Image (tube, grey):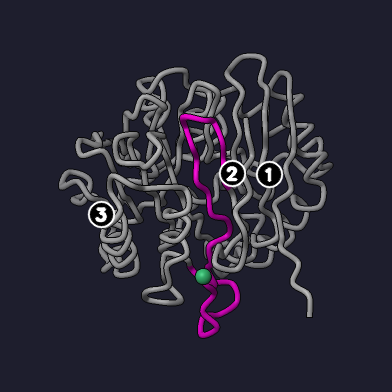
Amino acid sequence: MSVTLRTLPIIEVKGPPRERGRQQGEAARLQIPRALARYREIFPFTVAMTWEDGIREARKFLPYAEETFPQYVEEIRGIAEGANVPFEEVWTLNCYEGLPESRQQVWGCTCIAVRDDQTANGHVLLAHNEDWNSVDRDNVYLVRAYPVEAPPFLGMTYGPLLVNIGLNAEGIGVAIDSVYPTDVGVGVPRIVSSRGVLAARTIAQAIRACVPKRRAGGYCYLLADANGELYYVETSATTHEIVYGEEGWLVHTNHYLTPKMRALEEPGTYAGSHVRFNRARRLLRAQLGEVTIESLQTLLRDHVNWPQSICMHEDPAEPPHDREQTLVSLIMDLTERVLWAAPGPPCEGQYTAYRL
Ligand SMILES: [Zn+2]
């Protein structure tokens, strides 16, 4: 029996927003229609509405995004054109986490940031396991981009989504955790904000991109730069909290950590998120001062509380539309501008280095 190690597809795009989008859409002509077809099937279960109702709902978000981040709406128009699929379907998936009722589900993700004085070789590292519905398992790809209006960047996305996790040539990195505030509404979709961080030239610009006015909801954004400045920004539609990585490291999962934001959190135990959070903190603490790419890989492959572990696997007990797994595992070396990526779950794959 031979084992073939998978690597992720990587797409290269350049130019103005619409043109970049077209290039992404064309290169992902397999992944995009496949994602749209799968979401059409699972919508009635995951967001408790038909595909058509979802499209109608997502339309309400568009004017807000066009006002704040017109360049990324253009990018999305290009993605649809390049993949030869309707814009409104692509737009709907970019609004997915803001659609009513999708909050019934708590999805995962584990984020870790480590400052240069805590790593063995003095590099700043940002790591992320992307846990999401396993329908997107085969839709993940990387994008290396050379925008005309912003720094080059290298990041991850799946299906028809904007690139939303990655690093840029200024040494700024972003990773995101889904969080579950009660004040959600119609506004700028959170994924558009995350895309905006990749255009930041300073850490302050990165923070500002996370909190546009009239936003629909929010993520927790884990931000870091090559100077070793580490932040997380917990956001909801109406408020936010900024936390600095005083000790040289940060861990975040899918529950709010600050008292102000916790007051806005949907009731729930968030047990899986707490378990991953504490486990990641414990494993990271044990290696502070000597953290390496390899030691973070080991951490991201951890199986305590399997299958809802840091390295997350599908639970066969769940109905197919509710199954979650780590889709991709990433470690960004912000000092070197290198992204290490492994198809998920990372215990079954190898990490490959991609240079910006
Ligand atoms: Zn695993």
Question: Mark 3 or mark 2, which has the lower sequence index?
Answer: 2
User: In what element is the residue under mark 3?
Assistant: helix
Q: Amino acid at mark 2?
A: Asn
Give the left or right position of residue 20, taking residue 219 as reference. right
Q: For this rendering, which residue is in front, 147 or 82? A: 147
Residue at 42% x, 64% y is 310
Location of residue 262 in the rendering, given as x and y in whole percent from the top left corner:
21, 51
Q: Confirm whether residue 329 shows in the render.
A: yes
Query: Which tag is nearer the camera, tag 3 or tag 2?
Result: 3
Three-letter residue code for mark 1? Val
| Element on which disc 2 rests | helix
* Residue at the limit of the structure toward the left, as seen here: 259
Picture layout, residue 60 above or below residue 256 = above
Residue behind mark 1: 90
Gap between marks 3 and 2 measured at Cα: 36 Å
Which residue is situated farthest in the top direction here?
Answer: 149
Q: Which residue is mark 2?
A: 94
Displayed quadrant of residue 106: bottom left
- How packed mark 3 is, by other alpha carbons closer than 10 Å (few <14, some 14-19, many 20 or more), is few
Q: Position of residue 87 (x, y in %)?
A: 72, 39
Question: Can you say whether 202 is above or below 179 in the image?
Answer: above
Q: Earlier in the sequence, mark 3 or mark 1?
A: 1
At 52% from the left and 28% from the top, the residue drawn is 198
Q: In this picture, which residue range is highlighted in magenta?
A: 312-340
- Residue 337 shown in magenta: yes
**Kind of element beneath mark 1:** helix
**Callout 1–callout 2 Cβ contact below 8 Å:** yes
| Tag shown at residue 167 | none
Which x, y percent locates residue 14? 73, 23
